[in-house]
Image (tube, helix red, strand yellow):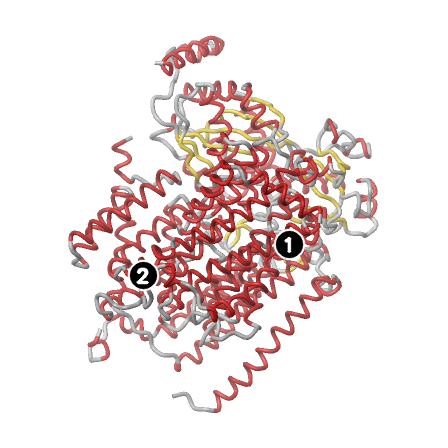
Amino acid sequence: MKKVLLFVLVVALMFPLFAKGGVEAAGSSEGFKPAKDITWYCTSKPGGGSDIYTRAFSDAAVANGWLSKAPLINYKTDGAGEVGRNEVANTKQNADYTLLTFNSGDLMPMVANTPNRIRNFTPIAVMATDKQLLFINPEKAKYKTFADAVAAARTGTQIVIAGSKGDDIELYGMLIKELGLRENQMAYITNDSTADAIASGLGGHVDLVMSKPAAASEYVKAGMLIPILALSDSRFTGNLASAPTLHEIDARYNDVELPVWRGIVGPADMSQEAAKFYSDLAKKVSESKEWNEGYLMKNSLKSSFMDYQEAKAYMEKYEADYLKKIGK
Amino acid sequence: MSNFAMLFSGFSVVFSFQNVAVCLLGAVLGLIVGAMPGIGSLAGVALLLPLTYKFNPTTAIILLGSLYYSNMYGGSFSAILLNIPGDSPAVMTMLDGYPMAKQKGRPGQALFTSNFASFIGGTIGMIILTFLGPGLANVGLHFGPQDMTALLLVAMTSIGWLVGKNPTQGVILTMLGILLACIGMDPQTGAPRYNFGNMYLMGGIPFVPFVIGTVGFSQVLRLMSERKNTVSEEKIVNQKLTIRGSMLTGHDIRRLLPPAIRSGVLGTFVGVLPGAGATTGAFLGYAMNKAFKSEEPFGTGAIEGIASCEAANNAAAAGAFAPLLALGIPGSGTGAVLLGGLMMWGLNPGPLLFTNNPDFAWGLIASLFLANLLTLMISIGVIPFLIIILTVPIKVIIPVVLVICMVGSYANTYSMYGVVIMFVSGLVSYICEKSGYSTSPMLLSFVLAPLLENNMRKAFITSQGSVGIFFTSPISCVFMVILFVIMLSPVIRGVIKVGKKRLRPNK
Amino acid sequence: MEEKKTEKKGFFTILSDHLPQIIPVCTSVISVIWIVLSFRKYGFWDEYKGPKTGFFPTIIAIVMLAISIFALITSGKVKKPEFDKESWMAAIGLLTMVVLTYAIGMELSILAFMLIWLRMYEKCTWRTTLVTTSIVMALVIGAFRFWLQINFPLGLLGLLIG
């Protein structure tokens, strides 16, 4: 009985949202409400980053009664996630009940290595964004500022950056392009995870470490890493505020940034009503206490919610920019 | 000595009724999860994580820590009894464990050896962890990519011991294992390679289904012809199905101790190294102890063989807690999940954990000691029940193992792709083995080669393509010297042997 | 397989007799594919960065090619493998289970396989058949599906249910 009441409440709450939608929603005044189990694809193994994010979302949605039943998480790790993404893109039968955790780190290899594109999905929401910084290990680093490191690279000393896979590699490429350096002047080592990159920085095997704020924060607190470059168009806050942006270091350069986002998409065949329902659900989750304290804060992520229409425009632009960059 | 005092305060945290009960629960679940092929500690820990939200952080991490730890015990059960490794370090255990159980008819003693060696290895690892604590983690940091490359080259020589009677054929499959491991994503550029445009192959060949096929399924194919030869109730178990009947003799224990202690120390340090993990630990332990005297040759069911790898992999699992707790650096996927768990309870794993939450950090270490002891007792207690499996007639075992192969492969990849990989690799391995190709070196090269390639390429990036880096870094230089010593001695001996054989006509 | 060595030599017998040659030929082909791919697509050595994508695999492939050729030359000495027809039954059984999975789902296919294999193929007593089957089903459903939350495929049956 409680559940039914909650459902009525949810639908009632959604009404003004539909009304704002105007003409579009008028056709189906009933809207969409899930009548059976939702299958949520996750392209990491249980315990992976995408899994934690997906479960945090579903926990928040269930705890507040916005979903009567937790979605079934379907782990599809084959082909480094491409198989799962392809499956969702081609889902026709159950399109309104299929969701996929989709991040910028998924989009880049997908468009680089497969013909699958954003147009094969229905973007539902962007939940959070993140950016990177470069750090040095104050005990072992030969160059204490980023300007010194760039100067050394220009005069023939190789500077080595350690980072993780995926978006970190792309960001590195953008950085050396902006600096006008070659890959051997400022080299990049790909690690399986940011933790491994930090370990090589702590051991003094590399000059610079690329990391997002969350992974590095404990080391910054302990004084084992110092941020020296913000890969963003503005400075970070808190104990990362000391790192200047590239443009601040030298006015000749533009700021370099590659915002990393975590989002949700559905199959291309998902109805607009369903997309709207999930998008509204995501909005409520993004404002919930569970999500903000249990997920965003723990991972030092910035909440930057985009609904299904904004997310569509954002993801499409992101894909177009990236395709242009890799020359496809 | 303050570390020791801290450990005692840790014990005072652990010895509450709830924590001991939870530790016991973790040990039992870990054993089961570890013994099931296809399900590793990663999935076990990840799936239990939600259950622990109700507990306080210390209790919760004790549960997960003991589960992770006892998993290392469980992996060897199916390796010894069914010749199917429950996890990747157990590939080495299988080499001696299965012959000891099957051919020598001492399954109880094989399990006992594995459990006892695991206990010794784990205890050594934990004692080193307690005394050196955070200092141990710093040892790992000194290992750069060039040092890891050199170490892995040394580890790869252990493959040389496995090629068996036909070295040519053994080397071919070793190389094949490496080439298969190259399928998937390039570790440095992230671009797909050798996938022939296939989407599934883009993610590479998953290891667990590959092992289940190569070892488990091909084993079933072999058993099919054996099941008629043996009299219905064949006597494969010539011991009583009791704990007493599974006890090791004093002589056995004297054989077990030296390799277990050596491996325990070695394994601990391997566990501390970045990205090396329990599997590399097991391989290195086996390779090292091979150099010492053993009563029976390794690979024929020697107690020393089981002890050397089991002790090393448990020590490595304990050693891996040093960088995890002291620096917040997980050595494996499971470590990463444990870290995620820590964060979920509001702790900040990282360099400040020992300072800010000492009771927690030491509580966890103390719980490892407890988990080690509890797991030993449980796993010895279940030996009689486990060896009942060996009294089941082969014809009944065959369909059961077939189902386990399929379910295990599916559970590991969450898709039929794993089952397909298992089927194909099993069939091919069976045909190859029948033709005199031994497949175990292929498994080892499959695991180690990607680590080797990745570290080697990292090293070359920092040296701008110069080989000199492997000899200028002191650590890697030492390993290179060890490598040359290991490689040259059997090669010379082998050349002499082959030369002698050549002189004699082949029958 | 007693009559194998007598007059009639089927296709598979000829095949298995030549396995000592076939395997090295296969591995040679694989190494050649790897070498060609490495040079044409992935690159070998970068002047500044050292090894490229194809470097490590190429070296290994060259070694494998050399040893495979050596194995082919010396293959005459290798004992011809003998296979037992019965062995392939296990492969066929597994394959049937996989195919059935697509139709009736994995759990039902396992159930059917266990019953048919034990009762019809191995001629076990009903008691043995049922006890073994129940243990296996308890493991698959209890441990894998419920505890470890593995969603086994439902096959075509899944379409009917949901």
Please say whether residue C8 is visible from this viewpoint. Answer: yes
Residue C54 found in image quarter:
bottom right
Q: Position of residue A216 (x, y in %)?
A: 68, 37
Q: Amino acid at mark 1?
A: Ile
**Which chain is indicated by disc 1?**
B
Q: Position of residue B287 (x, y in %)?
A: 55, 67
Label of residue B390 in the image: 2
- Image quadrant holding the N terminus of chain C, namely bottom left
Q: What residue does disc 1 label? A: B128
**Mark 2 neighbour class, 10 Å CA radius: few under 14, some 14 to 19, many 20 or more:** some
Q: Nearer the viewer, residue A185 or A12?
A: A12
Q: Are marks 1 and 2 in contact (CB under 8 Å)?
A: no
* Mark-to-mark CA distance, 1 and 2: 38 Å
Marks 1 and 2: which is nearer the front?
Answer: 1
**Which chain is indicated by disc 2?**
B
Residue B361 found in image quarter:
top right
In the displayed structure, does residue C2 sit left or right of residue A187?
A: left
Residue A286 vertical position relative to residue B378 in the rendered view, above or below: above
Residue A33 found in image quarter:
top left
Residue B487 vertical position relative to residue A45 in the rendered view, above or below: below
Q: Amino acid at mark 2?
A: Leu
